[in-house]
Amino acid sequence: MRITQGTFSYLPDLTDEEIENQLSYGIAQGWAPSIEFTDDPHPRNVYWEMWGMPMFDIVDAAAALHEVRRCREAFPNHYVRVSLYDPTLGRQTTALQFLVNRPDDEPGFSLDRLETADRRINYTLRPYAARKPHGSRYGG
Amino acid sequence: MAEPRPAEMPSLGTGMLQGHQNDDSFTDPSEILEDPRLEEVLGKLDRELVALRGVKNRIREIAALLVIDRLRRSFALEAGPPTLHMCFTGNPGTGKTTVALRMGEILHRLGYVRKGHLVSVTRDDLVGQYVGHTAPKTNEVLKRAMGGVLFIDEAYHIYRVDNERDYGQETVEMLLQVMENRREDIVVILAGYKGHMDRFFNDVPGLSSRIGHHIDFPDYSIEELMEIAHLMAEERNYVFTEDAEKAFEDYLRHRKSQPRFANGRSVRNALDRVRMRQALRVYEMSSKGRNLTKNDLVTIHADDVLKSRVFGGGAYDDEERSVTSR
Ligand SMILES: Nc1ncnc2c1ncn2[C@@H]1O[C@H](COP(=O)(O)OP(=O)(O)OP(=O)(O)O)[C@@H](O)[C@H]1O
Ligand SMILES: [Mg+2]
């Protein structure tokens, strides 16, 4: 099951050229790119690992793309995403975020039902991949 | 879903050239050759930098090569990206940094670097203090310089062969790799004094061959130094009287033979001190009740120059101290 997360997630995966164009656009807006990765695909997992520092002082998108590639090389079977942070006063938040890498095989989620009092049911999602410990998910 | 707004695209100048595929189809080189913005930077280089004939010619050659390369590409005559890394050698104050700054602009106009900014660093910005510190540090600098020019002043300090535990080696290796593999993303300009640079190239095999242009910046003659002085005086709205001019030339002749002479920079420093003396003289004039004219404010007299300690015969001027304390 293909995870959709962030901007462009219903489009086919972006090519490197498209990623570079998005980065160029963001940098031209004064946004700082940063790169994160994870092997926990749960939509509520907001704590991804940082790949290096946010890049506040780069001028050209090639530098950020370079780090995207290095991160992918190190974690070919993780999710990798790029965030562009808008530091302007009053905004100070992520302006754009999209996936730039995903595992080859995405097993998806199981839906667990928990019966509680009065025949009520609570639902929760559980990524199949997350049943294995960190680092050994997605065949990696 | 909203379309992403179009991102700023690198201008490789292909747009107007596409479609000329055939051997004798015609392409109009004037479009590129007479690109007003290119002429503007080359012209500015000519006007604002005195002398440096050799250097300027070399830059015109490089510009011509890049322009022609672009035309060739319009005929699908690929030759791969040219090696634009450079090494500037020369004594202090001969204009290396100034020219490097212009290089960024020129290469940008020619579409060979995407942004054209200059990141100027020395050993301390690249080499770390402990194991594992160097690679991230160098990497940060390289990233900052991507799309522009990385200028490494006194490059030979990066690596000291005599100290095998020197972390600079890591930096050198990363530089070598980037200079070879990321030629479209970054132009590296090394600068330093000739002898030291030559030794550095001997110590680091493979570096010299990655550099396409070794450019030497000769010391200026007295005439050229005077031209620089005139240019600087003009920029600062001062004029020399005839006597002052002679005195200044005399000053330069003295100063040139003393230690730590720094060509253009010495001229600038001397001029700064002449301005101080001139200001004091004018100030005293006015406190004696004289009315000041505009002329008084812009004119440099021989006296303003002759009070320099260089003429005292003894120690050379205090300029170097004032430079380093800044
Ligand atoms: N040909 C020139 N025409 C006009 N000004 C010049 C020329 N060459 C040098 N200068 C002036 O001299 C000063 C020093 O030049 P610059 O900093 O480029 O020297 P440098 O070669 O980088 O010296 P260093 O090796 O000490 O770093 C600058 O103020 C510059 O404007
Ligand atoms: Mg310099």
Image (cartoon, coloured by chain):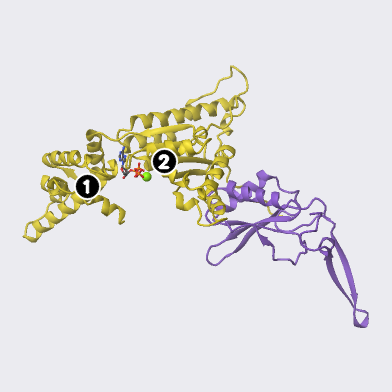
Chain colours: A purple, B yellow
Task: Give x and y (percent) for residue A74.
Answer: 70, 51
Mark 2 residue's CB less than 8 Å from ligand 2: yes
Q: With B221 as the anchor, is A39 left or right in this view?
A: right
Q: Which mark is residue B253?
A: none
Say which of marks 1 and 2 sits in front: 2
The residue sitting at the right extreme is A119
Q: Nearer the viewer, residue A6 or B231?
A: B231
Q: Is residue B122 left or right of residue B249?
A: right
Quadrant (top left/top right/bottom left/bottom right) for the C terminus of chain A: bottom right
Please determine whether, in this image, residue B303 is positioned above or below residue A81.
Answer: above
Q: Nearer the viewer, residue A26 or B101?
A: B101
Amino acid type of disc 1?
Leu
**Residue extending farthest bottom:** A117
Residue at the spot x=17%, y=38% of the render? B249
> Where, by quadrant of the figure, is residue B290 drawn?
bottom left
Q: Mark 1 and mark 2, same subunit?
A: yes
Q: Is mark 1 within 8 Å of ligand 1?
A: no
Helix, strand or loop at label 2? It is strand
Q: Quadrant of ligand 1?
A: top left
How many neighbours does mark 2 have within 10 angstroms: few (below 14), some (14-19), or many (20 or more)?
many
Q: Are marks 1 and 2 in contact (CB under 8 Å)?
A: no
Q: Amino acid at mark 2?
A: Ala
Q: Chain of mark 2?
A: B
| Disc 2: which residue | B191
The N terminus of chain A: image quadrant = bottom right
Is residue A127 rendered to the left or right of residue B92?
Answer: right
Label 1: which residue?
Answer: B271
- In terms of secondary structure, where does tag 1 sit? helix
